[in-house]
């Protein structure tokens, strides 16, 4: 541990950004990483690192207890799905301030979240936990239209299935289980544009930092984000009010939030929410469009080192990301264009000789293009034009059963 005199926070799991943001603010860090695997790069950035079984809350607590006894941890933080619950559990056991374990559990369990919304009279969506394909058939008949089958604790669009009706229920159940789905939850299908509401909370007060327009495949995998949203102001105001009421209902006290919303003909409806920054480079889009560093705020705001963001923050421009989804097969050739813009980013997750499978979850995408712009429309045009110039030539005769197979 370094000999600085600043506050000390624990960071449970994740990439280096949160630890680096803490260091920039003079905050010392204890990084908890998964035991039994290679030492992650984040461990080398932190002041101290300790391994623990991240699936065992007691193990994480025991790893952090000596540091709390010596330094009095100011917060136990995480920005990853894997780390949020053990972080909240350790914070409660150690008496460290932060979001309650109850709140974090609510946000990670879509079934309990729906039950809470029903009791609060917010965002009515018909849903039902399931124990068998027969129950899915019955729910489809009750709804009388398409339904969504999803894991109650899932993320990254994994094992999410659209069920057209009772006749499709058995096949959808097989697809769900084959994709690793568990704890099944059925919900009525919601039509309309999909957005995400990026929030930041401080002392129980919620600021909506941005609203993001989303592009989603029929498989529900997200393939594009643009901010600020182009929806009408009245629609955005309604979505913001619903999100703030929802965050109040779940008891979120501090830190970032990412709430996914469908804008239906009956009004906005909550899909799910997380007490973390959205994935898919949302933090970078927020930085470009609004000049706000959500990672820095996650550390600095609760410790009184940074002020809460203005409510609402003014947009400085636009930002967009588009994900690359070539056809399944073996990659034969890759060619990327000269962006002509030093701020544009082209990132590929595939190489020549690798095998690409169907896009069934966020991990199946082949890369992305990210750009800024004078406004949202300009950023989207720049991004889509650049993405169209990325060549990933695929031989469809390859083996598309797997996402990628290293050669």
Image: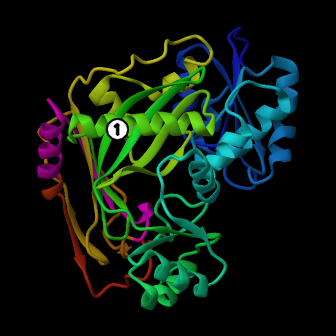
Q: Which of 44 and 349 is in front in this view?
A: 349
Establish if 122 lies above or below 191.
above
- SS under mark 1: helix
Which quarter of the image is occupied by the N terminus?
top right
Location of residue 325 by image quarter: bottom left
Establish if 47 lies above or below 403.
above
Residue 341 position, x and y percent, is 15, 36
Which residue is depicted at the point 24% across and 42% down?
A: 320
Please tell me whether residue 371 belongs to the stretch shown in magenta: yes
Is residue 123 visible from the viewing direction of this image? yes
Q: Is residue 198 left or right of residue 96?
A: left
Q: Mark 1 points at which residue?
A: 238
Residue range of the region highlighted in magenta in the rendering: 360-386
Which residue is depicted at the point 75% across and 55% down?
A: 36
Q: Nearer the viewer, residue 242 or 84?
A: 242
- Residue at the farthest top position: 5
Q: Nearer the viewer, residue 362 or 16?
A: 362
Which residue is depicted at the point 61% across and 49% down?
A: 119
The structure's colour scheme is rainbow
Q: In this view, does 70 lie to the left or right of 80?
A: right
Location of residue 305 by image quarter: top right
Query: How many badges with numbers are in the image?
Result: 1
């Amino acid at each position: 541990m370094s000999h600085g005199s600043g506050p000390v926070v624990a960071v449970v799991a994740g990439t280096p950004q949160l630890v680096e943001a803490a260091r920039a603010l003079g905050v010392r860090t204890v990084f908890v990483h998964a035991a039994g695997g290679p030492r992650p790069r984040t461990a080398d950035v932190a002041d101290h690192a300790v391994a623990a079984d991240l699936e065992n809350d007691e193990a994480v607590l025991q790893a952090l207890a000596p540091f709390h006894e010596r330094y009095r941890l100011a917060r136990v933080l995480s920005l990853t799905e894997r780390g949020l619950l053990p972080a909240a559990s350790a914070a409660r056991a150690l008496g460290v301030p932060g979001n309650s374990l109850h709140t974090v559990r609510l946000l990670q369990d879509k079934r309990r979240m729906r039950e809470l919304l029903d009791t609060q009279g917010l965002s009515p969506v018909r849903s039902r936990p399931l124990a068998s394909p027969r129950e899915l058939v019955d729910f489809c008949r009750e709804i009388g239209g398409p339904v969504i089958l999803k894991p109650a604790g899932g993320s990254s669009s994994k094992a999410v299935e659209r069920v057209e009706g009772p006749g499709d229920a058995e096949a959808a159940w097989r697809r769900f289980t084959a994709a690793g789905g568990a704890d099944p939850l059925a919900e009525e299908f919601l039509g309309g544009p999909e957005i995400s509401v990026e929030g930041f909370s401080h002392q129980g007060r919620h600021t909506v930092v941005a609203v993001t327009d989303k592009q989603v495949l029929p498989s529900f995998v997200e393939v594009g984000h643009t901010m600020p949203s182009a929806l009408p102001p009245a629609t955005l105001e309604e979505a913001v009010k619903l999100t703030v009421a929802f965050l109040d209902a779940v008891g979120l006290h501090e830190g970032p939030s990412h709430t996914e919303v469908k804008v239906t003909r009956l009004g906005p409806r909550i899909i799910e929410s997380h007490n973390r920054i959205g994935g898919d480079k949302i933090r970078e889009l927020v930085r470009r469009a609004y000049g706000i560093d959500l990672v820095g705020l996650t550390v600095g705001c609760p410790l009184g080192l940074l002020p809460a963001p203005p409510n609402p923050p003014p947009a400085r421009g636009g930002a967009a990301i588009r994900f690359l989804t070539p056809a399944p097969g073996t990659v034969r050739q890759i060619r990327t264009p000269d962006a002509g813009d030093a701020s544009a980013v082209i990132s590929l997750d595939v190489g020549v000789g690798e095998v690409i499978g169907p896009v069934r979850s966020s991990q199946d995408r082949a890369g992305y293009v990210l750009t800024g712009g004078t406004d949202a429309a300009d950023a989207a045009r720049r991004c889509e034009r650049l993405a169209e110039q990325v060549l990933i030539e695929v031989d469809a005769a390859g083996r598309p059963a797997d996402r990628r197979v290293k050669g």
